[in-house]
Amino acid sequence: MTDVDALLWVQRTVDNLSVVVHAGGELDMLTASTLSAQLDRAEAIVVPPAPVVLDLTALTFLGSAGLAVMVTHHERCAALGSMLQIRAGGSVVTRPLAVTALDQVLNVVPQFAESAR
């Protein structure tokens, strides 16, 4: 049995009215529910129209289940009057987003951009 916490770490912080969810490690079918649960909590406390910021700059792997989590929470944030901003970082994240054309659907911001306030 694999220890999910050893594969993916997730931390949630509040930055003014925005909620920032930092994730690092492997985001795949085994760990996607962990990230989704943290995004659920972030959506519960964010004050729209402030965004939920998903910082993926520390990911080492991004699978299709992780992409699905991003799409789901993009839609949920929009329904709340907020938005999901994704800090992609390197090619581990940007390549799957580009190949699937999700970079045209999701709100991807440069790695060092500050969250909207």
Image (cartoon, rainbow, N blue to C red):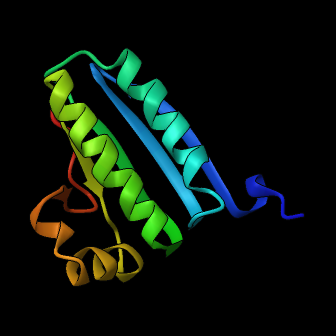
Residue situated in front as seen by the camera: 52 or 115: 52
Residue 33 appears at what percent x and percent y? 58, 47
Residue 104 appears at what percent x and percent y? 9, 67
* Among the 4 quarters of the image, the one containing residue 115: top left
Residue at 17% across, 27% down: 79
Residue situated in front as seen by the camera: 79 or 54: 79
Residue at the left extreme of this rendering:
104
Residue at 66% across, 61% down: 30
Residue situated in front as seen by the camera: 73 or 113: 73
* Among the 4 quarters of the image, the one containing residue 60: bottom right
User: In the displayed structure, does residue 37 sit left or right of residue 114?
Assistant: right
Count of numbered tags: 0
Residue situated in front as seen by the camera: 65 or 111: 65
Residue 69 appears at what percent x and percent y? 41, 52
Q: Which quarter of the rendering shows the C terminus? A: top left
Residue at 56% across, 67% down: 28
Residue 61 appears at what percent x and percent y? 53, 75
User: In the displayed structure, does residue 78 sit left or right of residue 10?
Assistant: left
